Image: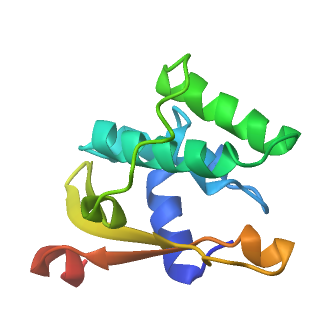
Amino acid sequence: MGNAASGRLLALLVDPSLMTTHANHLRMAFHPLGARRWIVNWEQVARHLLARAEREFGESKGDEQATGILTELRRYDGSSSHRQRDLPLHPADLLLPIHVKKDDLEFRLFSAIMTLGTPQDVTLQELRIETFFPADAESEAF
């Protein structure tokens, strides 16, 4: 799920064929027709997102849907093996810089993904809130 701003951003960067009612945002980033085509620092973004997905989905033992999306993301990323999930988090892992360039449009954002530390409900356990902020004045104007 996303708000109107995320819908506009995705419509700008993602092929319409991926925009379904319950589209997976990781798929829309990693898919060859997804946002990755326009992300200048894709290697950094992919490494960050895939490591996070492996940490979180790796805890979902027996969840076929989580295993399936993780396998799909690895296939799009070209990695056949598991990356190390057990690496400690660093302060730099909290913010993800994203540099987008599509045709004459160029902007920079930073993103933070928040989760609840000790959810008491399965719905809250699966909740991820991703926020995007402009990284410079030009991106803020956009």
Q: Position of residue 131 (x, y in %)?
A: 44, 77
Q: Residue at x 38, y 39 (%)?
A: 47
Camera-side residue of 76 and 128: 128
In this view, 34 is above or below 90: above
In this view, 86 is above or below 7: above
Q: Is residue 87 visible?
A: yes
Q: Residue at x 88, y 40 (%)?
A: 62
Work out which quarter of the rendered image holds the C terminus and state it.
bottom left
Question: Relative to 78, is 67 on the left or the right?
Answer: right
Rendered image quadrant of residue 110: bottom left
Camera-side residue of 54 and 38: 54
Q: Position of residue 72 (x, y in %)?
A: 66, 30
Question: Relative to 127, is 5 on the left or the right?
Answer: left
Q: Is residue 34 visible?
A: no
In this view, 23 is above or below 67: below
Question: Relative to 98, is 62 on the left or the right?
Answer: right
Q: Position of residue 43 (x, y in %)?
A: 31, 36
The residue at the far top in this view is 80
Q: Total number of numbered labels?
A: 0
Camera-side residue of 115 and 137: 115
Q: Residue at x 45, y 67 (%)?
A: 9
Question: Relative to 49, is 111 on the left or the right?
Answer: left
Q: Position of residue 20 (x, y in %)?
A: 75, 56
Camera-side residue of 62 and 9: 62
Work out which quarter of the rendered image holds the N terminus and state it.
bottom right
Applied colour scheme: rainbow
